[in-house]
Amino acid sequence: MNLELTAEEQAFREEARTWLRENLPDGERPPEGQPMREFDLAWQRTLFDGGWAGINWPTEFGGRGLSDIQQMIWYEEFARADPPFTLNNSCTFVGNNHGGPTLIANGDDAQKAEHLPKILRGEVVWCQGFSEPGAGSDLASLSTKAVIDGDELVVTGQKTWTSYAHVADLQELLVRTDPTAPKHKGISWVICDMSLPGIEIREIETMSHVTDFCEVFYDEVRIPLTNVVGEIDNGWRVAMSTLSFERGTAFMADQVELASEVEDLIAEARTRTGPDGRRPAIADDEIARRLATARAEVAALRAMTIAGISRTARTGVPGPEGSMIRLFHGELHQRVYQLALDIIGPEALRLTPVDGEGNWTGRYLQSFAYTIGGGTTDIQRNIVGERVLGLPRQ
Ligand SMILES: Cc1cc2nc3c(=O)[nH]c(=O)nc-3n(C[C@H](O)[C@H](O)[C@H](O)COP(=O)(O)OP(=O)(O)OC[C@H]3O[C@@H](n4cnc5c(N)ncnc54)[C@H](O)[C@@H]3O)c2cc1C
């Protein structure tokens, strides 16, 4: 595998670096609610106006039609520019990284024309309504039901862990449209307008004090049948395409950002006093060894990401191999923040999770999400075993 960039890709990197130097917003991202939404949408609009939205989306849908490698270069330059916020933790994440790509792959012409430009221009926030209290890892056992009535679906049920539902305009919603069919059949993937009558949203606070999480209740919510993506009862196929983007390419920015976090941590270990109470933390053999391992592992993660991009370029849609990257990334993410807390020592207890930039404690608490969201590590291991290695199904 050739990891060298072409001259065109190098030029793209320079272009991105220059633009970011001049356009990166100052100041902190508001952590919650409408101010957070406005900040994220304003940044998305800035990206669009500058020609940096949808770098790897087809030009016919308003993107730049460039490669996933160029998209990755952009993320690397973004992380290098030391921004006051991360791209992964944004309410524009779902629309850009799996809602939009799912519509590109499965939507009809009207759905694409209606929704894709709005995502890129920063006019809408999307959220994902897949998980339910009784359906997480076993997503196909979802029970939120939708009954066809004339040219509408009438939806009743509950979703949970819906990130950013409280600030979202639209939702990727999975509903059961045929309760008599086997559980992977009879599911439909629907675009749900979050302002419809009958929708109630309740926020859930997590241990990292973030209130992005919500429960969403649906009481006879009427959604036009034209909002079904793919065919009615064929939503499992569409959902698998959403999850392939979510597990395959959506976390590319985060994978890249982790490399610069490791460099920040190395800098931190040079200034903090180590376990002997005298020398800097980096002079401690064990800490130095773990930092060197982390640096090697983020380099390995980058190579895996590039290998994944090459595979997707050949096949068009990320395959089950994305789960290998997601698994390695999730567990590495947690190791890096555990190391951060070991370096910082008892002072980590003084920081509260919402104490802004440079807060290793908040990021440590948030890191637990990385082995759960988008499919737990157990589920990723099952996918790698069954669909990549071809082991017998459990
Ligand atoms: C930060 C974050 C954001 C999220 N955002 C969203 C969102 O926006 N929209 C949305 O719909 N969902 C979202 N989720 C929910 C997420 O998809 C689920 O939490 C996840 O799929 C696991 O489901 P569960 O919580 O019901 O756990 P369960 O499925 O109940 O799993 C419990 C435990 O059993 C294990 N387990 C279950 N089945 C198996 C098996 N077959 N083999 C081996 N082990 C198994 C799991 O690994 C886990 O350890 C989010 C979660 C997180 C952490």
Image (cartoon, rainbow, N blue to C red):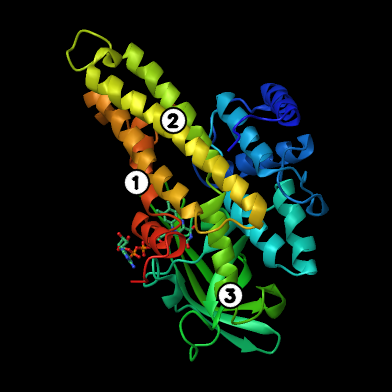
The Cα–Cα distance between marks 3 and 1, rounded to whole angstroms, is: 29 Å
| Residue 235's disc number | 3
Decide which of 88, 147 is in the foreground and name it.
Answer: 88
Q: Would you identify the image quadrant in which residue 270 lies?
A: top left
Residue 353 in sight from this viewpoint:
no
Q: Is residue 363 left or right of residue 34?
A: left
Give, as a three-letter code, the residue at label 3.
Gly
Could you tell me the amino acid type at mark 2? Answer: Gly
Please name the amino acid that badge 1 sits on.
Phe
Confirm if mark 1 falls within 8 A of ligand 1: yes
| Mark in the foreground, 3 or 2 | 3
Residue 302 position within the rendered picture, expressed as x and y whole percent measured from the top left: 51, 36
Q: Name the residue tied to disc 2.
A: 356
Question: Looking at the image, can residue 186 be seen?
Answer: yes
Please tell me which residue is depicted at 50% across the width and 59% down the height of the picture. Answer: 320
**What whole-number distance in Å separates the C-alpha atoms at marks 1 and 2?**
18 Å
Q: Earlier in the sequence, mark 3 or mark 1?
A: 3
Vertical position of residue 163 compared to residue 27: above or below: below
Label ID, residue 368: 1
